[in-house]
Amino acid sequence: MSSDNTGRTAVVTGASKGIGAGIAKALAGSGAAVVVNYRTDAEGAERVVAEITAKGGRALAVRADVAKGEEGVRELFARARAAYGPVDILVNNAGVVAFGPLTELTEEEFHRETTTNMLAPMLTTKALAAQEDVTAASVVNVSTGGTLSHPAYASLYVATKSALEAYTIIAAKELGPRGIRVNAVQPGASDTEGTRAAGYVGSELEARAIAATPLGRSGTPGDYGPLVAFLASEDARWITGALVLASGGSR
């Protein structure tokens, strides 16, 4: 099994750090030209680009808040096309989470998580499909293993990712006749900049998650990139509408 994406153009949302950065590097390593999308962390995005280009890859950092509406998404795709040609790999990685009791959820947090975790992938997938000169492409949505384990204190996050998984399956049916495959990966508990900022890493929640993981640790960004690069490649040509659990055995 290999992951050759030579000559292809990938957009990875939320790729300035964490899992997104790991995915961007893996796609570049498989031969794709990668657009490293970010919302605020320009320094992080440029660092990812520098790591890719230092190894002979092609990469470009593009700022766009994909949760804010179609205008920003169109600009993101226009920049990608101008630099590398039509986008035929899309990784919807950008996501936000706030861990806490459901009794403390606010309307503001509801809108923050639903627009980033669900609306943004819908808009970017729509933009990819709008490219009339693309007849074969791969979309990979980054969900969470929490849609299987349903952990406490993550009700809104898991709900938005559950919706993303349903969208993945339906989009695969609608876009399949055009040669566009749509899959999702379900990462397990992971140690990233995002989970550290959210207070998850080092918490009792993480300790319980590790105890329930057969491989005995949290995931890292490097654990997911190769899987996404494979799903994006021609070697995964018969895989669409799949939800792929990558959680160290936790479920």
Image (cartoon, rainbow, N blue to C red):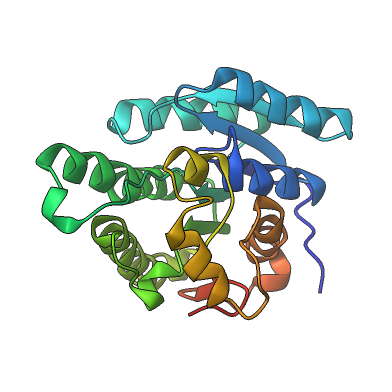
User: Can residue 190 be seen from the camera position used here?
Assistant: yes
Image coordinates for residue 92, horizontal then vertical, percent: 47, 49
- At 40% across and 68% down in the image, what residue appears? 146
Q: Position of residue 247 (x, y in %)?
A: 57, 71
Residue at 60% x, 33% y is: 36
Tell me what residue is drawn at x 69 percent, y 62 percent.
233
Q: Nearer the viewer, residue 15 or 3?
A: 15
Relative to the observer, which residue lies in front, 72 or 118?
118
Asked whether, in this view, residue 91 is left or right of residue 27, the answer is left
What quarter of the picture does the N terminus occupy?
bottom right
The residue that appears at 49% across and 32% down in the rendered structure is 77
- Left or right of 221 on screen, residue 70: left
Report the number of discs: 0
Q: x, y (%) of residue 82?
A: 60, 24
Q: Nearer the viewer, residue 215 or 113?
A: 215
Residue sitting at the far right: 55
Judging depth in this view, the residue of 181 and 120 nearest the camera is 120
Q: Is residue 42 above or below residue 169?
A: above
132, above or below 158, in the image: above
248 left or right of 124 in image: right
Q: Position of residue 99 (x, y in %)?
A: 32, 51
Res. 13 visible in picture: no
Q: Could you tell whether 142 is left or right of 246 in the image?
A: left
* Residue lying at the far top of the rendered structure: 43
Q: Residue furthest front?
A: 204
